[in-house]
Image: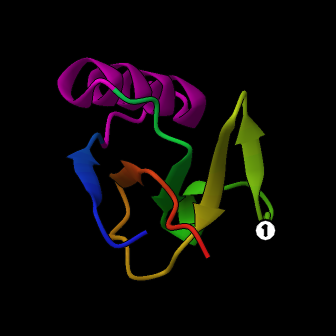
Amino acid sequence: MHIGMLLFDNDPRTTLSVKIQKAMDYYRHKFGHTPNLCLVHPGMLDNDQKQLELGKLTIRPYRPVTPGYLWIGIEDQR
């Protein structure tokens, strides 16, 4: 993903899945498309998970994303 939307949410009382769902809803409302990829700092996932799925959204750890941020958008086609 080269283009996406970067969102910040460091509220410790909100789970990652709720944060991502809010980000998906905001992205869909703003751009009219449903995102299919969310990159997060590896420390935001449990037990060094390699990848998660939330519906049709893939959540992947990506070290350059700062903790507390979500980089959400459409995965580049190969």
| Position of 75 relative to 33 (above/below) | below
Identify the residue at the far left of this view.
Answer: 30
Amino acid type at image mark 1: Lys
Front one among 13 and 27: 27
Residue at position x 66%, y 49% from top?
Answer: 58
Q: Which residue corresponds to mark 1?
A: 50
Tell me if residue 58 comes above or below residue 26 in the rendering. Answer: below
Q: 29 or 62: nearer the eye?
A: 29
Say which of 43 and 39 sits in front.
39
Q: Give the range drawn in magenta.
A: 10-32
**Which color mode does the image show?**
rainbow
> Percent from the top left, x then y, of residue 23?
36, 31
**Left or right side of 3 for 38:** right
**Residue at left 56%, top 67%?**
77
Residue at 38% in and 63% down: 67
Which quadrant of the rendered structure holds the C terminus?
bottom right
Q: From the viewer's perspective, tell me whether residue 51 is left or right of residue 15.
A: right
Badge 1 element: loop
Is 37 part of what is drawn in magenta? no
> Residue 62 appears at what percent x and percent y?
52, 75
Rendered view: 22 above or below 11: above
